[in-house]
Image: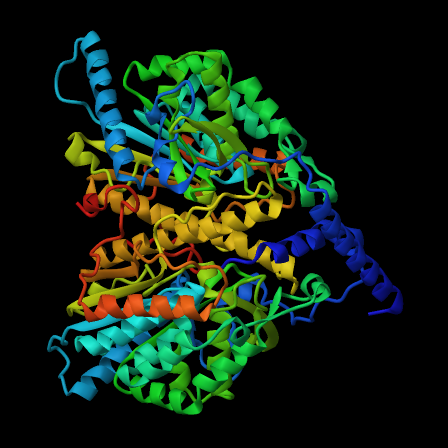
Amino acid sequence: MTRGCRWILFAFAALTALLVGLFFVFRPSGVERQSAVPSELQGLAVVPGFSTFIRYFPTDATHVVEFENDILASNERERLELARHGYTGPLPPVSYLAISGGGDNGAFGAGLLNGWSAAGDRPTFKLVTGVSTGALIAPFAFLGPAYDKTLRSIYTGISLRDIALKRSPLWVLLGDAMSDNAPLRHLVERTVTQEVLNAIADERDKGRVLLVATTNLDARRPVIWNITDIATARSELALELVRKILIASSAIPGTFPPVMIDVLAGDKAYQEMHVDGATSAQVFVYPSAMHLQQLAKRKRTLYIIRNARLDPEWAQVERRTVPIAFRAISCLVQFQGIGDLYTIYTVTQRDQMEYNLAFIPPTFNYPHTKIFDTKYMTELFTVGERMAVKGTDWWWKRPPVLLSGVGEERVE
Amino acid sequence: MTIEISKSFLLSAAVAALPLLAQGCATAPPRGKAVPAELQAAANVIGYPAGIRYFPRDAAHVAEFESDYLDALTRERAYLHISPGTKLPPVAYLAISGGGDNGAFGAGLLNGWTKAGTRPTFKIVTGVSTGALIAPFAFLGSDYDEKLKALYTSVSLHDIAKERSLLSIVYGDAMADTTPLHNLVKKYLTQEVVDAIAAEHEKGRILLIATTNLDVRRSVIWNVTEVAAANGPNKLDLIQRILIASAAIPGTFPPVMIDVEAEGQKYQEMHVDGGTASQVFVYPAAIQLSALAERDRTLYVVRNARLDPEWAETDRRTLPIALRAITCLIQNQGVGDLYRIFAIAQRDNVDFNLAYIPRSFQVQHTVDFDTNYMKALFDVGYQLAVEKREWEKKPPVLISGVDQARGQ
């Protein structure tokens, strides 16, 4: 290290000390939050203006029971809808769609859905779930091929500045995130309109269900939001809440600001901190505690779109604290995603549901140098689109066990 | 593992100001060149054969794992005088998870299991992170219970890590210095222990430890019994380094650099905490154990963590939010690992058993490696085993609300 360097380092240390000192003297008020819901009241918290069970905590017994009731109620609405069309037999086979997180890799899922429509055999999904980028795709996937164009324009027509703005280092330190996602909020406001909300409400009346997951960081647990149930209000309040949920579901903690949701518990006002649903699970279908086949017998086929590669991505990691920590987080996320695929696989086996999985193939090699790079997303969109156009027989029937070495090997 | 908030503010200040002077000025600790992507599977630790470690999702490595597993069966047959073709006796496997100071739970459970008199001699023992530090002693059996007890009830934070200055956090490779942990491992994991492990290798037993190769972002399973039995250089040092790497929480503890060669060229791999990939593992999912050899297998998974959510009001600031999110990610990754193992156990007819820190354990966890906390947790694990509490037969689906609804 040269002498000049050392001086800069000392200046840097002094500056840091000053910043930290200033912080403790003048706590900025810009990011104050109201009290979190106390631990023992978690299960009782309600979003004002809505019923308690527009959302579920998937590992809480009471909530699971409520989720089961809501699924049964949706089946009743489905029966009525079928009866209107003259069908009164047992519930017909259904398809479910689960769309994972993955940031700009959501272009894969958006392309796949477009290609699937083109192939002509895309089902109308009884249930659609979304996490993070998957939450942004889910409402349009739910509404069907009429919204394919919206998906295409979101995932091939935008770049980083349509998602986030950089914040200054001081604001990073004192604020609640490294960047500002106001552009993403505008994107959601432009695409998720009152008309979209009303269309979702119409589908609810036919017995269909749209779910989006966020993570409640205070309680450190996932929250599944029943978007179809929220949409039935068809109100401005409902639209605002749905938009908030979609933005929360994709709010990568530390990178994007958390979404604070006002709630009431035991007649007192509190605030919950919601972030990226992928902090809990990259992809989900329904709570593991729920035995779907016992609840209502019918043939079910599940399609999972994992907006990620599953093969290792190589890089020579710089031997420094921060690069090591960031690399480790990306590793953790990748493996957490694999665990999620197994969690879902176990549940589908138990509940006799057909399992289908799509993920970004290892053959996709377009360099991912910047996030939300338009060219990268367009290439990936095309990959997804081409896969789906080819038909559905390539879907994986279980989580892959081999991901490097012999590429074509699929151990059964 | 949690990091105190004051320390995290220092780091956030550092991160925020980092771009101001990152270029050209500071010198990161040197590292050798990473193994190029295409040579990954060919890289060997200098002086050792390929079969001392496996990449669990690589076809060639899985084949190597299978053949090493079959060789171990042959040694077991010879040791037990069982002729080929005769069905092998039932076996028990033990998988010990990561969890930092929560490893005291597993250490206590093993001690209590001995006391209960029902503890099997495990055919295979696997360990990740804190579980990697427990695994060699769990593998060697009840004679080493005292060592485990001492390791998890008499240490405190200063026996594990030392704080580093702000400058060496920013320009170094971690927030803390793990010289104390190195010394602790050297004190407990001696040449005598390595010789004992090598002796078990002859009986067909297997000890596996996982680290994460951060350059390729994948897990590496080290066959410690093969290392102990091999004729390689600095064997004791290599095993100690594998254990330390397995526990090296990235960003908090320095990574362990391992010298390898591939096609005659020397390279260096960066290894960190095995928990970065999986909190707990048994064997690669690509191996169908039931197809390799018929026998009755029972798996015991010790998850050194709570599975219920831990509540805390999150400070609305970048770094506290990010740190809280990481703990959340790790907790859920660990649940996914249990499902992965459960799915594979079902496929391969392995009897699945799970123990984890019960919700009823309510001692405050304010400081990492707090001796009193660890002692209390050791006792919880010990009591569970002594009272012969039932193991869970599947990953839990309900972790809050009504307890009785569980595992319906």
Q: Residue at (18%, 35%) from the top-left corner?
A: A293
Q: Position of residue A168 (x, y in %)?
A: 74, 40
Q: Position of residue B114 (x, y in %)?
A: 23, 78
What is the basis of the colouring in this image?
rainbow
Which residue is nearer to you in this view: B203 or A385?
Answer: B203
Which residue is nearer to you in this view: B134 or B385?
Answer: B385
Q: Residue at (44%, 71%) from the top-left corner?
A: B371
* Relative side of B68 to B13, left or right: left
Q: Is residue A359 visible?
A: yes
Using the rendered view, name the quadrant where residue B115 is placed: bottom left
Q: Position of residue B239 (x, y in %)?
A: 46, 81
Using the rendered view, name the quadrant where residue B127 is placed: bottom left
Q: Is residue B51 visible?
A: no
* A274, above or below B153, in the image: above
* A220, above or below A146, in the image: below
Quadrant (top left, top right, bottom left, bottom right) of the N terminus of chain A: bottom right
* B137, above or below A56, in the image: below
* Relative side of A168 to A302, left or right: right
Using the rendered view, name the quadrant where residue A404 is placed: bottom left
Specify the farthest residue to the right. Answer: A4
